Amino acid sequence: MTQISLARQSKITEEMNIVAIDEGIDPKKIRELISLGHVVIPKNINHHFSPKGIGKGLRTKINANIGTSMGHCDINEELDKLKIAILSGSDSVMDLSTAGDLYSIRKLIIENSNVMVGAVPIYAVFASLVSQNKELFDMTDDYLFDSIEEQCSQGIDYMTVHCGVTMKTYSMCDKSNRIAGIVSRGGALIAAWMHHHKKENPLYEYYDRLLDIAFKYDVTLSLGDGLRPGSIADATDAAQIEELIVLGDLTRRARARGVQVMIEGPGHVPLNQIQANIIIQKRLCDEAPFYVLGPLTTDCAPGYDHITSAIGGAIASAHGADFLCYVTPAEHLCLPTVEDVRLGVIAAKIAAHSGDIAKGIHNSLDRDIKMSQFRKDLDWEGMYKMAIDPELPKKRRQDTEKKVCTMCGKLCAIDIHNKMVK
């Protein structure tokens, strides 16, 4: 049984109770939101950890991507990234490994993670074919679904599946005037396979087979945006919206089967289109939780894309996005380092928290009020406790024991005012 199927039987599970306590919300309300599909609890029956909820009325959660690549494969480094991501406050990690012993890598990440773990199963499928000196076109339907089941059996909590890249949506993208074309790696791989075989996407054609696997392990499907824009000039075009229409239909089919679903979204989106993208997704996909990559608000900041994504993420969260995928300074450039992961998580946490304040999430403003009170009292230890990243402010002040900072010194406005009102 899955969380959504149990919720529809009016049962409050242990996981629902944990989420309710974490969010400060009545467990009955959590159960109701899950039964409607407006909230999901990604937790595989084979992965044991304290879960979190994603969706309507809950704090915006964030994810950190880690994993080996064919250009750099060091599992110990990826485990260090996992550790720093969790220590920095990430609610989730995704294993996007494409090199090495993928089964063992996935096993180690799941065993060492006390947060939800996601994956993009098509990566492992094609990486496995490459390792056998085969072409990506050699993938068969059974090979694909057997790999998906293997990953689910290991304990993956949610997985990105590019079911919306269909013959129709792919052709719309192919015939458009897109500048960047298809930038989703999973979307491009599926599209290339379809183009070669002149066949429909097996994830779409045999969607019921995918639902059966997901139901068996209570894996949440993250319906991927294989045609997301990779340039702000391509945002909100016909191919992107048509794919979203397909995902809306697949969302309803998943819910009917008792499978939890969330929707992935763009991508590169200019500031003035972010709110519209949220509204369209929520409308077409019946309020399914929305998982966005950034979005990045300009294409011109390589090396600083954790900042461009934080700008877009804050706006997206404020308007109803539920789950932010971090972007690191390495985006568009190279595989991220451990420090890149830390910076990406902190930037995403700032964006998520800013959005939660704007949409009035329960207790979201309390932390800021406490920080302001500690600032008023010039209580530095208190400020460190409230900081999203406590280590950096400690480091910046490690050479001074003065109550005021070196910016203002004796001209500190707060210190002057405090002395006035004593």
Image (cartoon, helix red, strand yellow):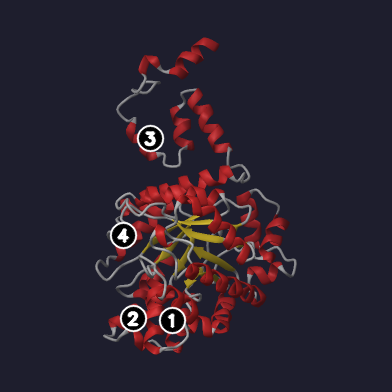
Measuring 58% from the left and 37% from the top, which residue is drawn there? Answer: 366
Q: Nearer the viewer, mark 4 or mark 1?
A: 4
Q: Earlier in the sequence, mark 1 or mark 3?
A: 1
Residues at marks 1 and 2, CA–CA distance in whole angstroms: 10 Å
Residue at label 2? 128
| Amino acid at the residue labelled 3 | Pro
Q: Residue type at mark 4: give it.
A: His
The percent position of residue 6, horizontal first and vertical second, equals: 69, 70
Q: Residues within 10 Å of mark 2 (few under 14, many from 20)?
A: many
Where does label 1 land, which residue?
A: 147
* Three-letter code for the amino acid on which mark 2 is drawn: Ser
Q: Secondary structure at mark 2?
A: helix
Please tell me which of labels 1 and 2 falls first in the chain. 2
Q: Nearer the viewer, mark 3 or mark 4?
A: 4
Is 282 above or below relative to 185? Answer: above
Q: Name the residue tied to disc 3.
A: 393
Disc 4 and disc 1: Cα gap in Å? 28 Å
Q: In the structure shown, which secondary structural element does the residue marked by tag 1 occupy?
A: helix
At a point 59% along the width and 77% down the height, the residue shown is 215
Label at residue 2: none
In terms of sequence position, does the residue under pointer 3 or pointer 4 come before the other?
A: 4
User: Do residues under tags 3 and 4 come within 8 Å of each other at their CB atoms?
Assistant: no
Residue under pointer 4: 332
Residue 218 point in image, percent of width and height = 58, 72
Q: In this rendered view, identify the residue nearer to me: 211 or 355.
A: 355
Residue 11 position by quadrant? bottom right
Give me the C-alpha separation between circle 1 and circle 3: 45 Å
**How far separated are the C-alphas under marks 3 and 4?**
29 Å
From the top left corner, tell me how far across and down residue 377 is, in percent: 50, 22
Residue 337, visible in the rendered structure: yes
